[in-house]
Image (spheres, rainbow, N blue to C red):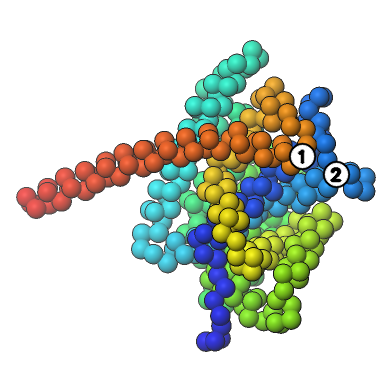
Amino acid sequence: MNHLIPFELTLNETKVIKGVAILLMLIHHFFSFPHWIISGNEFIGILFLESTIEFYIGTFGKMCVTIFLFLTGYGLFYSYQKKNAYPYSLKKLGLFLINYWLILCLIFIPLQLLNSSFEFSLKSFILNLVGLRSDYIMFAWYVRLQIAIVIVFPLLKRLIKTNLIQSTLYGICMPVMLRIVVTTLMNRVSILSDNTFLVLFNEFLVYLPFLLSGYIFAKFKLFSKMKHYLPIFLDKWYVYVILIIGTMIGRNLLPMLLELIYVPTFIFSIISLIRMINHQWLTNGLGFLGEHSLNLWFLHAMFFGKMVYLQWIAYYPKISVLIILWVLILLIPISILINKMMEKIKLIIFSLNFNQEFRLSKLLKRV
């Protein structure tokens, strides 16, 4: 394998994939749930079979979450090659939570105060801070998953061995089998069906294989091996387009478990296409969306759930493509503002840490 040509994701390409994933999430939420759309906000889509193309793309778009998790696992591999990886991950988790709290406290709670039926509960607020409830931001359930991943990842990493087959068995197959056992118990034992711990643990097991598959792909350089063993005559743009369409159709027809195949295939095809097209504006555009993907994940919830009274603003253009563009135009300036605030907070945290380290070093010198 010494002659293996590297084909691993760069940092910019990770942002590009995040950009694609957040677009899929927007399409998924805006066009795949007719019961979420209140009367008068219906969109004009492209009719296809018994529904619209937007609906089918949006149904495939549910895969956006597992794409994000795959990328998280992929990035964690490289993070854990450095010293002090765990403290660094905890710091990043802290910044992630501050980012979420800014959106929650500065945007969503004030906007919900405009709703006469809104009732503030301290208990609910505290649970929302860590994602155990999502009363304010409908899509904030991911917060609890992110917290769990960062905290227990040093233990999860032990499931990944030096051998690819063993790593697949322990890191992917074992969580899948454990989830089957937990789900069976919850379905057959009534007293366990509503057990909060088991519900959350089962949710964690649903997404764990995707996280660890990303780690495995990075560790064993599987994207490079996929590229290496792909026959030259198949290394064509139209082959990657067919693969992308194939994953879209497959995701709509076959069980979620096969996303373990769909996700890396989709990412591999997208990156291969991006490298072939080699247009800076496309890479920069998707990368820009990727940089704002976390904020967009939370912010677009303002058009659904308890804030559905604002929904008419998002659906105002009526035409599906324009709705997505309009939503991005509305939300990206808010995301930029949040990022500016986060930069200030990072500087404050950095200065505090620096001052503490400086005082400690002076104290040690005196001793």
As drawn, which residue projects farthest toward the bottom?
2
Task: Please state the horizontal and vertical placement of residue 140, each as a whole percent of the image.
Answer: 60, 38
Q: Residue at x 55, y 70 (%)?
A: 8
As drawn, which residue projects farthest toward the top?
116
Task: Please state the horizontal and vertical placement of residue 16, each as a whole percent of the image.
Answer: 58, 56
Residue nearest the observer in this picture, 205 or 218: 218
Q: Which residue bears the numbered disc 1?
A: 320
Rendering quarter of residue 231 = bottom right
Above-or-below relation of 233 to 102: below
Density class for disc 2 (Cα within 10 Å; few <14, some 14-19, many ≥20) is few
Q: Which mark is residue 211?
A: none
Density class for disc 1 (Cα within 10 Å; few <14, some 14-19, many ≥20) is some
Q: Residue at x 15, y 51 (%)?
A: 361
Q: Which residue bears the numbered disc 2?
A: 46
Q: Residue at x 60, y 21 (%)?
A: 112
Above-or-below relation of 6 to 17: below
Q: Is residue 146 visible?
A: no
Cβ atoms under marks 1 and 2 closer than 8 Å: yes
Above-or-below relation of 26 to 229: above
Q: Residue at x 77, y 39 (%)?
A: 320
C-alpha span from label 1 to label 2: 9 Å
Above-or-below relation of 187 to 15: above
Residue nearest the observer in this picture, 187 or 216: 216
Sequence order check, earlier mark of 1 and 2: 2
